[in-house]
Amino acid sequence: MLEKYDDIIQDQLAQGIVERALKEPEGREFYLPHKTVIRETAESTKIRIVYDTSARANREAPSLNECLETGPPSQNKLWSVLIRNRFHPVALAGDLKQAFLQVRIREEDRDVMRFHWLKDLETKQVETLRLTRALFGLSTSPFLLGGVIDQHLQNLQHIFPNEVGEIRRSLYVDDLISGGETVTDTQHFKQNISVHLQRRKIRAAQMAFKCTLPGRANTFRRNENGRGTTHHTLRCKPELCQVPDGS
């Protein structure tokens, strides 16, 4: 299990999701505990590393989530999306691949997402790493992800306004729950999304849209090379982020 855990960390280092903290932190810092979660029934990732952004250093100290401004709710109501989907004779389901991990955090804010791991499994030497992307469980992640998606949709609005409008009404966080009147209409909708995403240079995004239609299953995947340019700031609550010395 230790080797598999390390493989995930090393893969995240290679992808730029995690980086080595080579300098002393300037300003605020936070060290995240982490653990593995095993899901034997999962189709893809059976082992995941979960970072606890609600952990406290002690009873009086605030957690990282308590120190961050979450931003206003920007996602659709799940109930509305599900009910609306029931009016489509043919269903279309899609999701963004590793959605939160595609949102890059500004370099000056990354010291609040530090954690420790073994630099060498044999010597058990410990090093300090830090995350460069938004995390599942981080209180600000839904708002940051919503802003990134909204910007991409604005960029595509003039190309296919009808499809963008449908996506806006049918998206819940990173899940698309939509459909069409006929199989042909639904396939056309999916193909339009696929074609325009391929033509657009959407950086910092790896998207996977899965369309399930009667009698068939089609999958569209998009992998973008190059580093993303969309950076976001973790806005703190000043009254909570001042942790007493020695805590």
Image (tube, grey):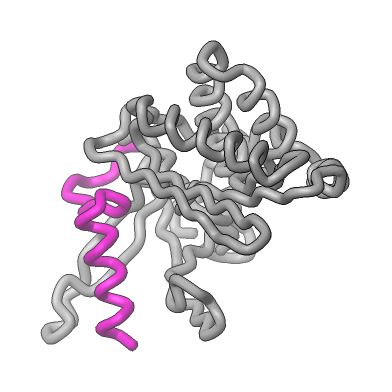
Q: Residue at x 35, y 61 (%)?
A: 115
Q: Quadrant of residue 80?
A: top right
Q: Is residue 161 visible?
A: yes
Q: Is residue 120 above or below residue 226?
A: below
Q: Position of residue 17 (x, y in %)?
A: 31, 51
The residue at 85%/49% (across/down) is 86
- Please tell me in which quadrant of the rendered image residue 88 appears: top right
Q: Quadrant of the N terminus?
A: bottom left
Q: Which residues are magenta?
A: 1-27
Q: Is residue 69 magenta?
A: no
Judge from the rendering whether residue 34 lies leftward or rightward of residue 78; answer left or right.
Answer: left
- The foreground one among 167 and 117 is 167
Q: Position of residue 141 (x, y in %)?
A: 55, 43
* 49, above or below 87, in the image: below
Of residues 152 and 111, the one nearer the viewer is 152
Residue at position x 52%, y 31% in the image? 192
Q: Is residue 108 visible?
A: no
Is 26 displayed left or right of 214 in the figure?
left
The percent coordinates of residue 189 (x first, y second) are 60, 35
Judged left or right of residue 133, residue 234 is right
Q: Who's the residue at 86% across and 43% down the image?
A: 87
Judging depth in this view, the residue of 59 and 181 nearest the camera is 181
Residue 37, position as x, y percentages in the image: 50, 77
When asked about the image quadrant of residue 184, the answer is top right
Any magenta on residue 4? Answer: yes
